[in-house]
Image: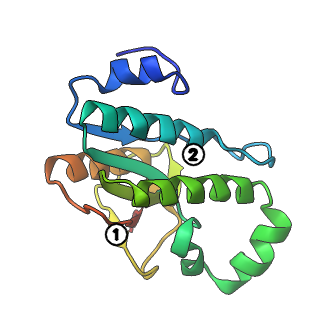
Amino acid sequence: MIEGCVTDSSDIRKVIEGQDTVVQTLGIGGKGNGKPTTFVSEANRLIMDEMEAMGVRRFIAISVIGAGDSLFFMPWIYRNFVMPLFMKWFVPIIEDKNRMETMIRKSKLDWTIVRCTTIKNIPPRGNVKVSFDGKVIKYSIAAADMAAFFADCISENRYRLQTPVICNS
């Protein structure tokens, strides 16, 4: 375990040194404060810069349902009524994840962006649904199942240059 700050390039370098793959699971936690943020996208930029400098190519990053085209996977009522009126705190989080996703897609890295539904600290269910079109999406995933999905992406080199949405069924 290496303690450090994700906004410090020298700390990032220490963590990446000697690695084949970087898994980035950054978020601001909870609901945030509803104010604009660039924490994830800026830290992600630093991580990617260090990866490229050190020749590490495989990058797996966590995002969120609602980012990018997955916004349209959500029901019309949610996109146009619930989120703008009752979940304003979520908008800055999605905007920052959108910046991050764009940056990753433009990179020369061997990337996977995993869009998660609500991550819950519940016992693992042992199954993960993967969607690229919004069908069969449920709105949560056990943290352990999410971690297992990330491990599969590494060990089996799955979902390269793709953006799956994952949830428990």
| Residue 147 location, quadrant | top left
- Identify the residue under disc 1: 130
Name the foreground residue: 120 vs 157: 157
Work out how far the residue at label 1 is from the one at label 2, CA to CA, in angstroms.
Answer: 24 Å
Disc 1 or 2, which lies upstream in sequence? 2
Q: Position of residue 122 (x, y in %)?
A: 46, 46
Name the foreground residue: 166 vs 161: 161
The residue sitting at 83% across, 65% down in the picture is: 86
Q: In the displayed structure, would residue 7 be above or below residue 160?
A: above
Name the foreground residue: 64 vs 112: 112
Q: Residues within 10 Å of mark 1 (few under 14, many from 20)?
A: many
Circle 1: element type: strand
Q: Position of residue 113 (x, y in %)?
A: 40, 57
Residue type at mark 1: give it. Val
Report the colour scheme. Answer: rainbow
Residue 19 seen in render:
yes
The residue sitting at 77% across, 61% down in the picture is: 87
Q: Is residue 89 left or right of residue 43?
A: right
Q: In the displayed structure, would residue 16 be above or below residue 78?
A: above
Q: Is residue 147 left or right of residue 11?
A: left
Residue type at mark 2: give it. Ser
Q: Which mark is residue 41?
A: 2
Q: Position of residue 127 (x, y in %)?
A: 29, 61
Q: Position of residue 29 (x, y in %)?
A: 63, 40
Query: Which part of the image, by quadrant, shows the C terminus?
Result: bottom left
Q: What residue occupies the far front of the structure in this picture?
A: 53
